[in-house]
Image (cartoon, rainbow, N blue to C red):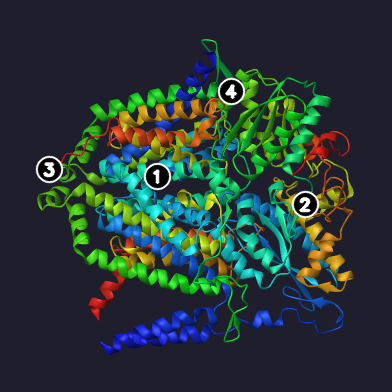
Amino acid sequence: MSRRLAIYAVVIVALAAVPIWFESFWLQTGLFAMAAIIAAIGLTILVGIAGQLSLAHAFFVAVGAYGYAYLADKIPPLLAVVAAVLLAGLAGALFSPIAGRVRGIYLGLASLGLVFLGQHILQNATGITGGYRGIAVPPFSVLGFEFTGADGMVVLGVPYGPLEKLWYLGLVLVAVSLWYGRNLVRSRPGRALATVRDSEVAAATNGIDVVRYKAAAFTVSSMYAGLGGVLMALAFGRIVPESFGFLLSVDFLVMVVIGGAGSVGGAAAGAVFVTALPLILNHYSGSLPLLAEPGSGGVGAAELSRLLYGAAIVAVLLFARDGLAGLVHRKERVV
Amino acid sequence: MNQFVTLLVGGLFLGAIYSLVALGFVTVFKATHVINFAQGSVLLLGAYVIARLHESLGFWPAVAVGLLAAAACSVLIDVVLIRRIRRADLGTLAILTLGVDILLATELSRRIGTDVLNIGAPWGNHVTELFGIRVATSRVVAGCVAAVLVAGFWAAFKFTDWGIAMRSAAEDGETASLMGIRLNRVAAAAWALAGALAAVGGLFLTSFPAAGVTGGVGVLALACIPAVVLGGFDSPGGAVIGGLIIGVVSVLTAGYQEELSFLGRGLGGVAPFAVMLLVLLIRPSGLFGTRELTRV
Amino acid sequence: MRRLGLVAVVLAFAVAACGKGGADESAGGEAAGGEAAVKTGPGTTADTITLGYLPDLSGVFAPNGKAMMEGANLYWDAKNEAGGICGRQIKVSVQDTGYDPQKAVAAYQQLSGDVVGLGLVLGSSIVSALLPNVQQEGMFLNFAGWTSDILPNENVAIAGTTYDIEAINAVDFLLTQKGLKEGDTVGHLYFEGDYGENALKGSKFAADKHGLKLVEQKITPADQDMTGQVSAFKKAGVKAILFSAAPPQAASLAGLAASQKLDVPIVANGPGWTPQLLTTPAADALAANYHVVSSMAPLSVQSEGVTKFLSEYEAKFPEGTPSSNGSLYAYAGAQIADAALTKACENKDLTRKGVLDALHSLTALDTGGVVAGTLDFSDPASPPGNLVYIAKVSKEAPGGLEALGEPSQAADAEGYSF
């Protein structure tokens, strides 16, 4: 037990020290990955635990992101975060009548419609969303401590700007999300949802209110998406509709599936994999040999990174049937 | 009134092309329970091959090669990848095809670059007059081809051994295989058919009045998703009807944009998805899809 | 096993523990060596100046992004061969954005420490996402997009005039040359987003001014078939069509208009043309009615800058003329960056602020006709240029466009506020 504590302590100290060592590229990438982790946990609860395929996740992420950006000017940022998460939850609850009626593949593709409707609204409701121009995201602040570089804070010789400060906010939010997600999966409601997934009839005969549980799963998942959206908005500084399109929804589903559907840790790993892989491949593309110089024709680094991304998805699904989570568990069993 | 009829006819012809691509989606889904997201890039592959080869081979041979290439590519996806994890769940299989789509689409759009490749069809930009309405000849050809293909598909599905094998495989794969039906063969045939249908769709979607083959053409297959869902994912007839509905809806919303401007402009792309959501609210398995029965 | 993991984590940190802070410390220092008098900052050393490029090389605009990098490399290779700027070689540091704001922000973070400015950024959603950082770090950004929404902005440089001014000029051209009269109806087909909606702002202004009725049709880049739009235009009885979308839509629009016997002039913004359109079935319809209004030169213009560009292009890519406008855009962008850097060198200040100040001190930059007229960067609230080339599609002209007269400006544009 004490050994375990020691490991946790080392990991926490190491994560806390990241902004001191790593350059802003890594912090930015890390923040995007953290936002994705939070949202992906929400989706794995919905897809993996409750068994409801959804391609609408980008829509709920957008509700959270735009909700925060719109409200944080008008009310204290901390309240705006809470309001944005509730707003995303509300959007999920409003969609749940459809989710309750429509099943499986139909639900997945119906929810895709929500993403396109969302894009249309983001582009056209210019009063709130700023249309194609998007809106600036007000910086986060809590108890008078601002998450900007304005105060000239320096830690161990490293100037602490918005990215460095947001890193810690992200760590806290990810930790809370992981903790809550794991508890939810293991709790009574989590087991009830799993029963709904396996057989709605069996669930109903055991006294589980299927419709209510499905609606609740959609709501909780959307709230996670909203929180992820808030962190994503903060990491961006300015949000535009293009960031919340069809491809983001697909990315989330990829995260959950290659992470191993239903595993909270797997979703987190999948999120890091999907978000960070293209960015890191791009980062190191300059040092990889045999690549054409950008703009000179031939397979460039950007294409290679896209090809590797596609190949990685195929490889994980073919060779690690239970996703990334399955790999870890298998290893543990061997040890 | 005249405008309405023109739009309706234009929409029906566009819808006929969507129907073909949608039929491909349904065939694959019925035979192997896969939502094939790679359909878009297979469509692009077919169109690309035709556009590249029509000058050296002539148009019709190029079409034949294009269809074969798309069908072969589609079968390869099934045989090399899908077959290995046949029993995986819906989400996993869908994401697998998505990975393939990324690979194919990236390579094809790299080859196409900024080019707008001419498909080289003999009907060029000719126009046909039907009852006083002027329609692009390519669309009339597309409508006829679609009608023939759909009828042929229906007949094959109903009367041939392959059709019976396919239907029984969709009904109950295990029993079908016990009865001596080779599921892998049925599946490969379905994928080949879907690939060829996608290529035909690609050929017409890139003919006049569209400009030609560009790197972004694969995205057009996305427009067929509402058609498939609307019609019912396991209903070939539904796919055809769904395709027609989506074609009409998207052309009508574009044509009446001025009148519909209170809903925001640029509705043409969103309207099919909105219609799909409405239909699903009323009929959760699409218009003609099999309702899920609850078995205990 | 676990301990091994622990060691790995610690090792990873030890390995990564380098560099951070280092880049910041050298910032603002004086360069050692012969030209000690020139002040330098991030992105400038004693023998190189590094410019960041953020094109889309893997997303929807990847082909344009590649064409742009062709143009940029062309310019800087020639410049470096001729000795560079301020005795320094120009280094181009490229990062792909994939037309994805998330990737773009990360890519920016990666190169921002080592560049003096951004030589070219594609996409206004990308620029929007980057602006908070760019402004904070005070570098210049060459925007490959001509939207006045970005104005006023101290950091952003645009090559020429904006889409709205182009649209005003287009309406003026229709009124003076194509017999359009007060009370007539004009259609405008435009893309959702900065490009189309900015052009719409201009056409609305001009339509108001001349009592024209405007029929709007908004589309997205995914729309490839203009059947519904053309039918709506025909019903409204339009006498001319303004076009602010991409080449595939242009072919569909012109072809369908011809097939529906809607024989009216079509006037497009710069991005609405590519020479490839002449290989599509709509070539004849385009040659009959299609015009382009843009501050970027048609390739058939016999000006010093364009000729130089074409000869350099042919030397490097013997297959012939560039197929996309992107390479010329980036070439013009490089000319502007070159002028700003050269001026900054004269001022002995190659810091980011020095380069930005030098850019704003350029009041009559001559690109040799690549961009219409001369460019004035002194007022961040208005676009640097106000002249446009008006060109007609011609199957014989190189690049498919033949300029109609010298660069000009519509009188209406004077009274327009951005």
Percent of width and height locating residue C146 = 72, 47
Q: Secondary structure at mark 3?
A: loop
Q: Residue at x 67, y 21 (%)?
A: C238
Q: Which residue is mark 4?
A: C232
Q: Which residue is mark 2?
A: C381
* Left or right for B273, reference C276: left
Closer to the observer: label 2 or label 1?
2
Q: Determine whether B27 is above or below A162 in the image.
A: above
User: Do the dots labelled 1 and 4 sit on one chain?
Assistant: no
Closer to the observer: label 3 or label 2?
2
Near mark 2 (Cα within 10 A), the count class, few <14, some 14-19 or many ≥20, is: some
Q: Which residue is mark 1?
A: A112
Chain of residue at mark 2: C
* Residue B226 visible to the viewer: yes
* Left or right for C156, reference A246: right
Near mark 1 (Cα within 10 A), the count class, few <14, some 14-19 or many ≥20, is: many
Q: Which residue is mark 3?
A: B295
Closer to the observer: label 4 or label 2?
2
Amino acid type at circle 3 is Arg
The answer to which of marks 4 and 2 sits earlier in the sequence is 4
Q: Secondary structure at mark 1?
A: helix
Q: Residue at x 27, y 49 (%)?
A: A215
Residue contact at pointers 2 and 1, CB within 8 angstroms: no
Q: CA distance from mark 3 to mark 2?
A: 69 Å
Amino acid type at circle 4 is Ala
